Amino acid sequence: MKTWVIYFFISVCILSGCQQNLRVTDEGNAEMDEQVLDVVSDNLTSTSEVAISEQQFIYPVVITLIDPRTLQIVKTFSPQLMGFGVDDKLYKSKVEEIARELARGTKDIPGYDQQMELDRVDANGEIIKGNPGILLKESELVEKVIAASYKGEDIFLPLYLLESNYNAEDIPLMNDVTVASYTTYFSSSETGRSRNIELSAIALNNIVVGDGDTFSFNTMVGERSVSKGYQPAPEIINKQLVMGIGGGICQTSSTLFNAVDQLGVKMKERHHHSLNIGYVPTGRDATVSYGTLDFKFQNNSGVPFLIRTFYSKNTLTIELRTTHQYKDVLKKS
């Protein structure tokens, strides 16, 4: 009974603002200073008139999450105060929520996950490096936290660097064979829309998609803004045609989808327009909106390929090319 009363008063103290007096030791356990002990002791004495020594207190264990790159503390919490040992199912769901928010971010705070910006090839055949992606493995973090919840521990976030996977020696040969192609048509009289299609097509040209790489249309094309040359043009929002900067680029994303869908790749994100469109068959579209709707696929074919785009007065053609030795591997079975 004494133990329960002691733990109750410690919990009350922590929840009511005494947490600033908690320290984390090298072993990852919470350490309470004499001032907090005196407060709790006074409460116990005045309530039950029982004299209890410091050795009788049970301190809640503490888990500290650390960014392995900066060694900064990201988050500290007590498993017991989150239900560990009382309702383990609820506790696990809370840990999963922590992992999810750290990886994917919240409305106000960005997460650790960072989409890979793929490499591309310039006009001289030289490789222009993109930026590696970052992945926080949520399931691994949850497992580590659950395992450490009995005694407390410092846990480094399981962050993984994702780099494009291809051989540089293959690059000069990547234009050898066209393994997939798709063409859509538009009216050049719609100047704003035509310009937006052209700019987004240029942004996709000569991108190298390595084995295992995840392609993100929004990452590779970037934000559609006036400063980048994008113009107002009709776009579909909630079943209505409205004017918006970058209207028309969904034709580029839809053309790309119909090309890559001919290969053995995995579609990871694709959305349909709320109205039928005329440049691809019904159900064969891939609408995008920067910051919300994306078109993503993962190249799990086992070999790399190159995205080539060709814009002309009334047409957009996207070809996927690779070396002779890889052509049969890429084709969808």
Image (cartoon, rainbow, N blue to C red):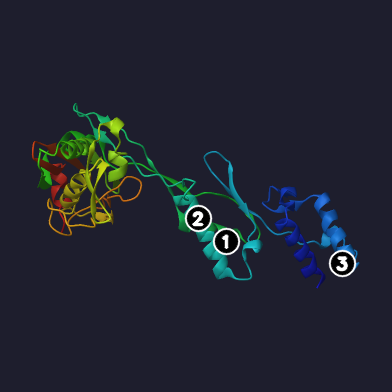
- Amino acid type, mark 2: Ala
| Badge 3 element | helix
Q: Residue at x 80, y 53 (%)?
A: 36
Q: Tag count in the figure?
A: 3
Image spot of residue 53 (x, y percent): 87, 60
Residue toward you, 264 or 296: 296
Please name the residue that numbered disc 1 is placed on. 147
Q: Nearer the viewer, residue 174 or 48?
A: 48
Residue name at image x 20 percent, y 29 percent: 125
Q: Looking at the rendering, in which quadrant would you find the C terminus? A: bottom left
Residue type at mark 3 is Thr
Say the numbered circle drawn on residue 99: 2
Under mark 1, the amino acid is Ala
Q: Vertical placement of 143 versus 48: above or below?
A: above
Using the numbered discs, state the Cα–Cα distance from disc 2 to disc 1 in whole angstroms. 15 Å
Residue shown at 22%/29% (left/top)?
A: 122
Residue 48 placement: quadrant: bottom right
Q: Nearer the viewer, mark 1 or mark 3?
A: 3
| Distance between mark 1 and mark 3 Cα atoms | 37 Å
Q: Residues within 10 Å of mark 1 (few under 14, many from 20)?
A: few
Q: Which mark is residue 47?
A: 3
Q: Can you give x and y, in whole percent of width and height, for residue 313 in the image?
A: 8, 36
**Label 3: how many Cα within 10 Å (few below 14, some 14–19, many 20+):** few
Q: Secondary structure at mark 1?
A: helix
Of mark 1 and mark 3, the one earlier in the sequence is 3
Which one is in front in this view, the residue at disc 3 or the one at disc 2? 3
**Can residue 93 be spotted in the picture?**
yes
Give me the residue at 46% from left, 58% from top: 139
Q: Give the Cα separation between the discs numbered 3 and 2.
A: 40 Å
